[in-house]
Image: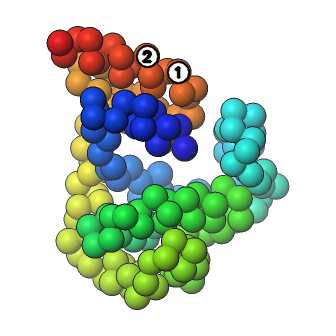
Amino acid sequence: MRRRQVEREFAGQVRFERRVYLLLPGEGQRPVYDDYLIQHRLAARSREPSLGWTIPEPGLPYPKSSVPAQLLALRVQQRTPERLEALEDALFRAVFVELADVAAPEVLRRCCTQAGVDTSEVEAALQDPALREQAFAEHAESQAHFIQGIPALLLPGMRPITGAVDTEVYRQALRFALSARR
């Protein structure tokens, strides 16, 4: 939400590029919600309560992997980019409001339906080796830039800005980068 707001404010001056960062690049790396994850969720909810965050109980199953959701987002970005924001919103709701596992194809199909994306895109995305290669390449690139979380903003000559920061942090960084470019 913040990125979109700032992107509108700086329209024509900056270009935002969506890149993959895999929070869970393997499967089952983090089996359940623990106090660490719950504290981050509570902090995010305090910053943006309007997003409807659900706070999980310790021990509740955590999503198995972020790869399937990212593959689907890449496919939608390539094939129907006008539906990407709606898909991202549906995926966000699935993970952070419904506490659903976005590694599950049925959850991804539900997100597609909510976003106006043909549900056949799920299987196509999951079976596309080129998308998988792209996702892991972009993830590796993020790690090379020392990005360790999402959302992340990477500006030339600056350290990455990661996590749920206030919108003003993005604005100040963009103003600084634009003034340095001039």
Neighbour tally class for label 1: few under 14, some 14-19, many 20 plus, Cα within 10 Å: few
Circles 2 and 1: CB atoms closer than 8 Å: yes
Alpha carbons under labels 2 and 1: distance apart: 6 Å
Question: At 27% from the left edge and 34% from the top edge, which residue is drawn?
Answer: 12
Question: Which of these two is toward me, 139 or 172?
Answer: 172
- Residue 102 picture location, percent across and down: 55, 69
Tell me: 46 left or right of 79.
right
106 in relation to 24, above or below: below
Where disc 2 sits, the SS reads helix
Q: Which residue is mark 2?
A: 172
Where disc 1 sits, the SS reads helix
- Residue 3 picture location, percent across and down: 46, 39
- Residue 17 picture location, percent across and down: 29, 45
Q: Amino acid at mark 1?
A: Glu
143 in relation to 119, above or below: above
Q: Amino acid at mark 2?
A: Gln
Q: Which residue is mark 1?
A: 168
Tell me: 26 left or right of 101.
left
**Numbered badge on residue 126:** none
Question: At 33% from the left edge and 13% from the top edge, which residue is drawn?
Answer: 176
Give the farthest residue toward the right: 57
